[in-house]
Amino acid sequence: MKRHNVMRATAVAALLSLGLTACGSGGGGSEEASSTVRVTLANHVWTDIIKEAIPEFEEETGLTVQLTQLGEDQLSDQYNVKLNAGTDEIDVMMYRPLQEGKLFAQNGYLADLSERVEGNAEWDWSDFQSGPVEATTFEDKVVGVPLITEREVLYYRKDLLEKAGLEVPKTLEELEAAAKQIKEENPETAGFVARTGRSAAVTQFSSYLYSFGGDFIDDSGKSAIGTPEAKEAYDYYGRMIREYGPENVSTDMSWPEAMAIFTQGGAAFYTEADSLYKNATDPADSKVAETVGFAPMPEGPAGSKPYNVPSWGLAINEASANQDNAWKFIEWATSKEKTLEVQKAGVPGPRSSVWEDPEGISTYPKDLAEAIAVSAENGVGYDRPLVVSVAEAREIVGDPIVAAITGEDAAKAAETANTSFEAFLEDEK
Amino acid sequence: MTARSTDTTQRGSAGKGPKKTGWQAYSDWANDHRKWLFAAPAMVFVGILIVFPLAWTLYLSLTDASGSVRAESDFIGLENYTEVLTDTQRFWPAVGRTFYFTIGALAIQMVLGMCIALLLWRPFKGEKFVRVVILLPLVATPVAVGMMWRLILDPNIGFANQLLGFFGLPGQPWLSSPETALTTLLFVDVWQWTPMVVLILLAGLTSLSDEPDEAARIDGATAWQRFWYVTLPLMMPTVIVAVLLRGIDALKTFDILYATKGKGGGSFNEVETLNIYAYGLSFDYMDYGVASAVLILFFMIIVACMWLVTFRRKGNK
């Protein structure tokens, strides 16, 4: 009899707990147009600034913002898992138009914003630069609003140039000669540094590729990384790091590592995205804050052709039931006033009016603003192959970069990569 | 207890008619099927968390799913498996690295762990302090450990090379050279997980009885002989537990590899083990079909290894 009771109690407890869990998981999600906007943002300077302003938005609209903030890779993984599962738990999402835009749009994750962007004259969609807009448009539908733009510029050390009696290099040839001279005169300092990781370097290498007259994919949609121009670009980039780069250079560097070398005073020249300039000019992070200068991407045989891209955008999750409120958030975060505010705090924005406004560039180092103006004019609208599986494509086209850095035959590596890339593009058709 | 239960039964029967009440019937049924009832939550758990994902992965591995798992995909039979098994660029090197890492880490950890455990076995002064210090690496998260070592081993600004420089030695490429990266990480794994082996072995050692050892001592056996012929055979069950636990762990190591070398295991895939490869395939390339095939093959490899270890053990008995 006693066991009988224990039995019964346990069974009831088990059933109860099962029932409770079922209730717990079945609860949320189905409500319509909630007053809570769930926003997922990447760790970025832009996010830090906008985060502080969110209470303003909440006060204006009476909505509540629930913010999730993640590192770049984690963000990407989250989207892949959650959007794949059709989640409605994300309303507004910060995403990388060039990296994931095509994939997400193709998978139907991104809501069509075409009508919304045209709907508000004051907010003014036509104010956004055309390059960035192109990157957030998929099959003639607007699927995202550009947030942050960037171009490749040359960071350099004024003191080292002065000491060596050199002018700021205007061509890639001059850059190499200057890097060589400075390295020879200061054995402790590298002449040049840049990203070296197979995938990470691709975006920065792109400006070299374009400036040498090459491209990732040619007009007919075939791989172009085996052309003589591309081979030369690979060889040049690899040689710059191998011969004039830091001692013990690794092939894993992305911008934090390369930036660290530059800001610790370890290199004379550094080519990187202008949106990261604060890292170099902020005395708290940078030992060279006082002596850092900026110049446009040096000219190659085909001129100076840096990339000019929107690195981040905001989009609405197609599965979200809260799209109207999500749009309110986007409208607010990308308004002229906010863009000006954010840009003054050091994040280059996508709005022409803000760039034309003297106040918009008032906080920028003068030489940087000039370099940006040049790059915005002759820039190329992408910095990586525009395909669906960008990560895979970056690894393929990045292979010759590391091969060149480690002193292998860059031309041969480019040939091999060309074959793989050809097959990859064929596969994706 | 009995009184209250009778009470309930009575109340129940009063409410629901003269026959066996619903509750009574349920109670009897529950008693008859109690072995299933008790196991049910566990079975549901296993079903949802183990069988379903496995079956789903198996299904995905037979399709050409890519881009999105919600997108339409075709059933392509064993094509993914042929592709993976003939892939000498990424898959087979990854298998090799997985085993190099697992066997290397396991061997060093077992020998080192046994040595430390033997040293800590007999009481000594400051024993507690030493034990705490040894356990420190164990309490850190592997991702944090990975990032910490990445900073320490950075070729330009890292502490390790600065220390070497202080002694006038040339800086080493540690993680940055394709030749040394995996071995360096193997030692990071040793650094972090040897304490775990020490812990298990120490527990085994302290539960051994002293008599066989004393007997051997009286018979004039040397320290080595006592260890090799007396202690080690007695410790065998504990050693096997440690080997199994650490082996499985080392086989599926992901965090420190990913935290230090990133996607694809570095620019030359130098530390790309099967885990990193499968992760890259699914999260970077979105090739869910191929990734699933890799995971199923990995699963089969693990099952085969487990079977070998346990089978050998049974054979020995």
Image (cartoon, rainbow, N blue to C red):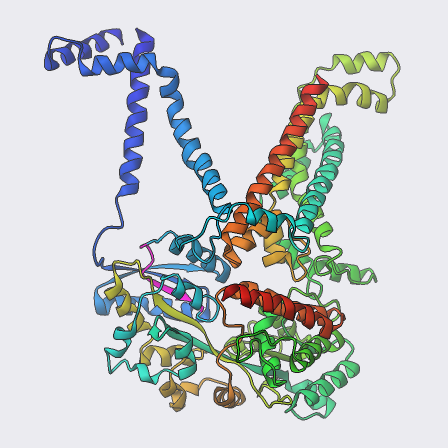
Q: Nearer the viewer, residue A270 or B284?
A: B284
Locate residue B49, reporting x and y percent: 44, 37
Tell me which corner region of the image, top left, top right, bottom left or bottom right, holds residue B165: bottom right
Q: Which residues are magenta?
A: A88-96
Locate residue A360, reporting x and y percent: 40, 86
Q: Residue at x 47, y 78 (%)?
A: A309
Residue A373 appearing in the image: yes
Q: Quadrant of the N terminus of chain A?
A: top left
Q: Residue at x 71, y 55 (%)?
A: B181
Q: Nearer the viewer, residue B8 or A387?
A: A387
On screen, residue B290 versus residue B2, left or right, reads right
Residue A257 appearing in the image: no
B46 part of magenta stretch: no
A90 part of magenta stretch: yes
Picture layout, residue A346 above or below residue A370:
above
Picture layout, residue A42 above or below residue B255:
below
Picture layout, residue B58 above or below residue A291:
above
Q: Nearer the viewer, residue A294 or B27?
A: B27
On screen, residue B307 versus residue A165, left or right, reads left
Locate residue B226, reporting x and y percent: 82, 20
On screen, residue B62 versus residue A176, left or right, reads left
Locate residue A67, reporting x and y percent: 35, 60
